[in-house]
Image (spheres, coloured by chain):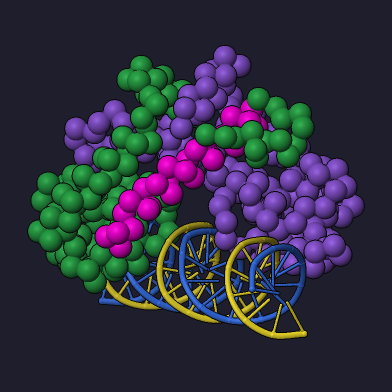
Chain colours: A purple, B green, C blue, D yellow
DNA sequence: CTACAACAATTGTATATACAAATGTAAGAT
DNA sequence: ATCTTACATTTGTATATACAATTGTTGTAG
């Protein structure tokens, strides 16, 4: 990926700035690829993310707060995001009987079925994005990212 | 940075998925740090980015297309973004005399003065973000990011 | 010169996000 | 029981972004 095009705009770019901008550029690219892969099914990345979290619950419900904590992108509109999924019939929602402040969300069969399709195209996208990487590269990358 | 919290949601996460999600999480964190550092001056990251591009032009004007190409985040609202900077008096804008389709943007003295202040706080933010990194780490990171 | 395609920027619209304020519920203190 | 505080979600609002359609300009083929 060509980061030089951007970085040439300021001549003596410190190694630090370069790394961070580079990181953001790559992340944007990755996000775009995910988004474009999911677009066919009218699912945003965040929605996909929530569906995967729910599937990971194996039947147990997740309340909005839990979703919020585990979502890739930070706190904001979990309510509205779940509304969208609800309208599509991909999740169920019920007030928690033991604590009526909480709202419990579960994935529907329809949601699971959709996820199965999405898994395939997402993993194809990931393969493409990482075609230049060996397993050793990936381990190294993870180690470096852990330092943040 | 704790990626496990998110990743525990799906049990057998492939190394590839893990790396990409990890990357996005880190990038989000970096973006948040930049945003919060710039917030004090009511400048968004994209606005900061454009100002830096303009400064890098050393007096030469940049048209909207050029800005667009060099902006960190992809094509969208360069017109509106520049409008904001214009309202703040940080840039000038004039129709290109040789090709009236183009709009030429330059940074004002006020814009340059602001950038000088921003440079300081941004570089402090970068230092914090990368405090765990040696120069060798940064080089490695850049090499890996280049593989995308 | 006119018609047409390509170009550069702008506008419209729908959706997404950040952030603060408001609503409704639960728990604890007096 | 009442008051206060904390909790969980929802709503409002301003801003940001994606994407398509539109406007105005230039270049070119006939």
Where residue D1 appears, as percent x and y from the top left, is 77, 85
**Which residue lies at the image location 19% right of the left edge and 35% below the top edge?**
A11
Of residue B1 and residue A126, the one placed in the foreground of this image is B1
Where residue A61 appears, as percent x and y from the top left, is 82, 52
Name the image quarter holding residue C4.
bottom left
Judge whether B127 appears above or below A48 on screen.
above
Number of disc labels: 0
**Which residue lies at the image location 35% right of the left edge and 67% below the top edge?**
B80
Judge whether A17 appears above or below A52 on screen.
above
> In this orientation, does residue A3 appear?
no
Q: Identify the magenta region.
A: B16-42
Membership of B24 in magenta stretch: yes
**Which residue lies at the image location 21% right of the left edge and 44% below the top edge?**
B120
**Which residue lies at the image location 71% right of the left edge and 35% below the top edge?**
B8
Membership of B57 in magenta stretch: no
Predominant SS of the magenta segment: helix
């Amino acid at each position: 990926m060509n980061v030089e095009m951007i970085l040439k705009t300021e001549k003596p770019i410190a190694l630090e700035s370069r790394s961070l901008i580079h990181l953001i550029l790559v992340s944007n690219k990755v996000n775009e690829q995910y988004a474009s892969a999911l677009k066919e099914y009218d699912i945003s990345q965040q929605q996909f993310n929530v569906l995967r979290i729910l599937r990971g619950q194996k039947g147990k419900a997740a309340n909005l707060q839990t979703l919020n904590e585990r979502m890739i992108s930070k706190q904001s509109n979990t309510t509205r995001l779940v509304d969208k999924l609800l309208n599509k019939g991909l999740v169920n929602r019920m007030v928690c009987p033991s604590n009526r402040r909480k709202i419990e969300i579960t994935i529907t069969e329809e949601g699971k079925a959709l996820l199965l399709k999405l898994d395939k195209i997402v993993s194809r996208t990931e393969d493409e994005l990482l075609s230049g990487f060996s397993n050793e590269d990936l381990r190294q990358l993870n180690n470096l990212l852990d330092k943040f």
